[in-house]
Image: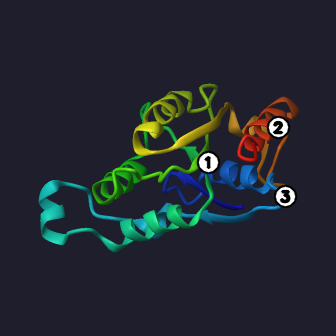
Amino acid sequence: MKILAFAASNSKQSLNKELARYAAGLLDDASVEVLDLNDYELPLFSVDREAQIGQPEPAKAFLAKIAESDALIISFAEHNGTYSAAYKNLFDWCSRINKKVYQQKDMILLATSPGPGGAARVLEIAKTSAPHFDGVVKASLSMPNFHDNFDVESGRIKNNEIKEQLIHAVQALLA
């Protein structure tokens, strides 16, 4: 099984990238590729810009990575209650190339933040919208208080209850 994991964030020190990497690592027999959205940076989407430049290569490359995978693990950063601008922009460009951005892939959707909300609002948006773009959401999990529940140095979840919930969520990819 080939897993594509990424944070829906362009932060170089993304908490969500740590969580996505950890979650993907829970699948023993899987081949995992962790993407960095900084490798898919694009100009701000507009129909005028699209008319000028057409379909940009980074968006095509991102869609190709999804196509090559068997399943997705996405961890969403929450910016003012919704997607990060970097992810939303990449998604907008991709959806102009292929409205079925997620290409019928099984997905685990995650979110975390430093605070008690755990980016739950953006996670709910993602869960609701993914099926409209051909995503098959198998499970989701919000992890609150990232720094209290995740040891960055060891790259592991410290909270056993959250760890068990994440293991259960990730195993849904194998069902």
On the rendered structure, is 30 left or right of 9? right
Residue kind at label 1, given as amino acid type: Asn
Which quadrant of the figure has residue 165?
Answer: top right
- Of circles 2 and 3, the one toward us is 3
SS at circle 1: helix
Q: Which mark is residue 84?
A: none
Q: Can residue 12 be seen in this view?
A: yes
29 shown above or below 127? below
- Of circles 1 and 3, the one toward us is 3
Could you tell me if the residues under marks 2 and 3 are in contact, i.e. CB atoms within 8 Å?
A: no
On the rendered structure, is 134 left or right of 28? left
Q: Position of residue 118 (x, y in %)?
A: 61, 31
Q: How far apart in space, not on screen, are marks 1 and 3 (Cα)?
A: 21 Å
Q: Residue 28 carries which label?
A: 3
Q: How far apart in space, not on screen, are marks 2 and 3 (Cα)?
A: 16 Å
- Of circles 1 and 2, the one toward us is 2
- Residue at point 44%, 63% (across, down): 63
On the rendered structure, is 136 left or right of 61? right
Which one is earlier in the sequence, the residue at label 1 or at label 2?
Answer: 1
104 shown above or below 34? above
SS at circle 2: helix
Q: Give the position of the C terminus as an image quadrant.
A: top right
Which quadrant of the figure has residue 30?
Answer: bottom right
Q: How crowded is mark 2: few (under 14 residues within 10 Å), some or many (20 or more)?
A: some
Q: How far apart in space, not on screen, are marks 1 and 2 (Cα)?
A: 15 Å
